[in-house]
């Protein structure tokens, strides 16, 4: 059980990292869009 719990935690961390990367990319796209408008 303990091993499985550890794996789940690692997977959750990986998912969080992926989500954070997606958010960062969205922010970058928005920033680029704003620069193009100005």
Image: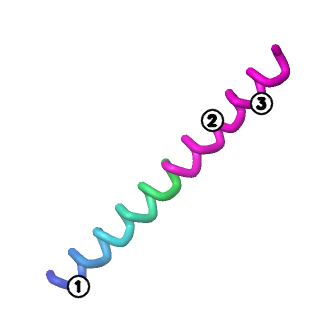
Residue 18 placed where, x, y %? 52, 55
Q: Which residue is mark 1?
A: 3
User: What is the image's colouring?
Assistant: rainbow
Rendered-image quadrant of the C terminus: top right
Residue 36 placed where, x, y %? 85, 21
- In the picture, measured across the screen, residue 31 lies left or right of residue 6, that is right
- In the picture, measured across the screen, residue 18 lies left or right of residue 36, that is left
Between label 1 and label 3, give the one nearer the viewer: 3
In the rendered image, the vertical position of residue 3 relative to residue 12, given as above or below: below
- In the picture, measured across the screen, residue 18 lies left or right of residue 32, that is left
Alpha-carbon neighbours of circle 3 within 10 Å: few (<14), some, or many (≥20)? few
Q: Nearer the viewer, residue 10 or 3?
A: 10
Q: Is residue 34 magenta?
A: yes
**Which quarter of the picture shows residue 3?**
bottom left
What is the span of residues highlighted in magenta in the rendered image? 20-38
Q: Which residue is mark 3?
A: 32
**Which quarter of the picture shows residue 12?**
bottom left
**Which quarter of the picture shows residue 11?**
bottom left
Residue at left 80%, top 24%?
A: 35
Disc with the residue nearer the chain's start (1 vs 3) = 1
């Amino acid at each position: 059980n303990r091993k499985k719990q550890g794996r789940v935690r690692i997977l959750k961390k990986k998912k969080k990292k992926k989500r954070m990367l997606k958010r960062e990319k969205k922010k970058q796209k928005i920033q680029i869009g704003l620069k193009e408008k100005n």
